[in-house]
Image: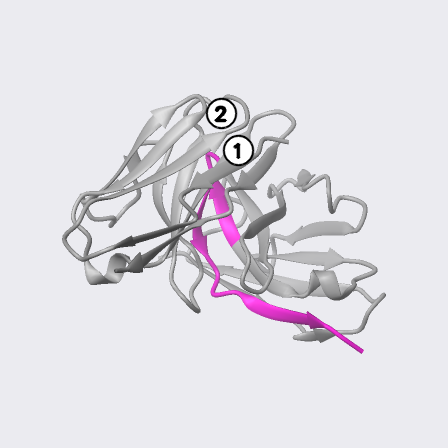
Amino acid sequence: QVQLQESGPGLVKPSQTLSLTCTVSGDSIGSRGHYWSWIRQHPGKGLEWIGYIYYSGSTYYNPSLKSRVTISVDTSKNLFSLKLTFVTAADTAMYYCARETDGCFDPWGQGTLVTVSS
Amino acid sequence: EIVLTQSPATLSLSPGERATLSCRASQSVSSYLAWYQQKPGQAPRLLIYDASNRATGIPARFSGSGSGTDFTLTISSLEPEDFAVYYCQQRSSWPPSITFGQGTRLEIK
C-alpha cells in the first residue's frame, strides 16, 4: 500500500521560504511511470497544482508559481521536497503531496496546513 | 491554460436519488479527465480516470462519461457517505499542465 506523508513547519513568516518534504512508503520514488507532485488548497477553496518531478529530476511547474517554486527529489531517502520562496499570506493553504500516474493523482498524503504570518 | 467549469456549484439531493455533475473544458482535453471526491478534513480521493474508468475500490454506482470538452460524473443512487465535494481535473500533454475545476458541493436535501 503506497502512502505519502507531508512534513514541515506549519508557520512561515512573510517573505521567507516555505519548505516541505513528502516521504513515500510502499513504492520506490525511482519507479518509472510516476511523477511526484505537490498540490495546494487555500482555506475553503479549490485545488491548485503546484508542480511535479520525475525520479530523474525533470520538473514541471504551474506557470503562475514557476518563478518561486523548486521541487527536488532524494531517491536515496525515497522523498521529494517543495520550496516556495518569498511567501505571502496568499500562500496560506493546505499542502498535499501525491503520486501522479497518467495524468491523475493517487494516492494523496493527508496534507499539511501552512500559515504565512508574522 | 485550460479552464474547467463545473456545474452546478451546489447540488441538493436525497439519499437514493441520482446525481449528475458536469465538467466543461475551455478546449478539448480528449479523455484526459479525472474526478475526485473530497470529504471535510480529508485529502481528495481519485474516483474516475481517463473520463470513464473507475479507480481501484470505487463502487459501481460511480460512473464517468464524456470526451473532448464535456464530461459527466453520475452517482446512480446516492449513499449517505457520498455527500461531499467533487472536483474534475485535466492534464495537458505539452507543455505539461494540470488544472482542476472549482468543485461541486453535493449536499443532503
What range is drawn magenta here?
Answer: A98-118
Residue B34 vs A3, above or below: the answer is above
Residue A107 vs A116, above or below: the answer is above
Question: Toward the viewer: A18 or B4?
Answer: B4
Q: Mark 2 points at which residue?
A: B29
SS for dot 2:
loop
Question: Toward the viewer: A95 or B13?
Answer: B13
Q: Residue furthest bottom?
A: A118
Q: In this view, does B23 lie to the left or right of A10?
A: left
Q: Which amino acid does label 1 sit on?
A: Arg
Q: Quadrant of residue A40?
A: bottom right
Q: Which residue is drawn at 48% across and 61% down?
A: A109
Residue A33 in view:
no
Within 10 angstroms of label 1, few (less than 14), some, or many (20 or more) residues?
many
Residue A20 vs A62, above or below: the answer is below
SS for dot 1:
strand
Q: Are marks 2 and 1 in contact (CB under 8 Å)?
A: yes
Q: In this view, does A57 lie to the left or right of B28?
A: right
x, y percent for residue A111:
52, 65
Q: Mark 1 points at which residue?
A: B91
Q: Residue at x 41, y 25 (%)?
A: B31
Q: Residue at x 57, y 38 (%)?
A: B98
Q: Is the magenta stretch mostly helix, strand or loop?
A: strand
Quadrant where the C terminus of chain B sits is bottom left
What scheme was used to colour the molecule? one colour
x, y percent for residue B23:
42, 35
> Are tags 2 and 1 found on a single chain?
yes
Q: Subunit of mark 1?
A: B
